[in-house]
Amino acid sequence: MSLFGFLNQYPWLVYLSGVLQIVFLVHAVVTRRNFYWIFILLIGSYLAVLAYLFLEILPGLRGGTRRAGAALGAGLEAIKPLDTRIREAQERLAESDTLSHRADLAALQARAGRPDEAQATLQPLLNGIYADDPVVLLTSAELELARGNAAAAESLLNRVDLKTSAATRTRSLTLLAQAQEAQGKTAEADQTYRDAMTAATTEEPRTRYAAFLLKQGRRDEAARLLDQLARTEQRATNLYRRQEREWFQMAAGLRRELR
């Protein structure tokens, strides 16, 4: 039986395809999918519906139950008062002095606006077997920046092994550029931001570099970089847009400053 004969025998499939075309068109517009999907869904009938289902809808649903469970657990933890979470983290650290427990406590103390306490929590790690651990160095450097100690942050960041991973390299160079900028080392910061953007694992370096350029009065360069970010956001998958939301939102704010 030909495909058309099959559809003639089951005409409700044609109606279902039409309904799904409308639903998927709305989904594509609301979630800002690439424009070609709108064109394909308009002219492609059931083939377009199947393509959109398998290429856009189903991948987003995979692992949904697992993510929902993790999100619920994180949500329940997040609604606890911060002081309670800090106390519980301190109790866990007292029971077992591990890298993870110290890092968790330091992160909570930093969120509570207590960077001095957070740095004190991490200090033993900087003098022990974890002295060269990238996570420890990056976290400590970030805290030093928050405390206004840009030179100390730069010293820590210069100890990070950039070959550890692409993510470590991106984060380390971005923080280093911020530390250099805070010290007025404009030329060095400019080059470090550029290095951070090479093979970056996040949009943070590009966005922070655009902000740096604006501060330096280099509006044309900043505008070109922000236009690139806007095009990246437009072409990005829904997952990537959620992942990089903080930087895309920051870039949108910078574009408003340019007007």
Image: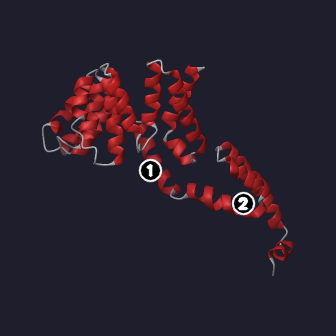
Q: Secondary structure at mark 1?
A: helix
Spot occupied by residue 69 in the image (x, y as percentages of width and height)? 47, 52
Q: Secondary structure at mark 2?
A: helix
* Numbered badge on residue 70: 1
Q: Is residue 102 above or below residue 37?
A: above
Q: What's under tag 1, amino acid-wise?
A: Ala
Viewer-closest of 169 and 63: 169
Q: Relative to residue 143, is residue 120 drawn left or right?
A: left
Which of discs 2 and 1 lies nearer the camera? The answer is 2
Q: Is residue 226 above or below residue 5?
A: above
Residue 71 in sight from this viewpoint: yes
Viewer-closest of 46 and 112: 46
Determine crowd level at label 1: few under 14, some 14-19, many 20+ residues with C-alpha closer than 10 A.
few
State the separation of the CA atoms marked 2 and 1: 31 Å
Q: Residue at x 29, y 39 (%)?
A: 104
Spot occupied by residue 24 in the image (x, y as percentages of width and height)? 71, 52
Q: Residue at x 32, y 33 (%)?
A: 108
Q: What's under tag 2, amino acid-wise?
A: Val
The quarter in which the N terminus is drawn is bottom right
Q: Are marks 2 and 1 in contact (CB under 8 Å)?
A: no
| Residue at the spot of label 2 | 49
Spot occupied by residue 187 in the image (x, y as percentages of width and height)? 34, 24
Q: Residue at x 54, y 42 (%)?
A: 241
Q: Is residue 28 above or below residue 196?
A: below
Residue 113 in sight from this viewpoint: no
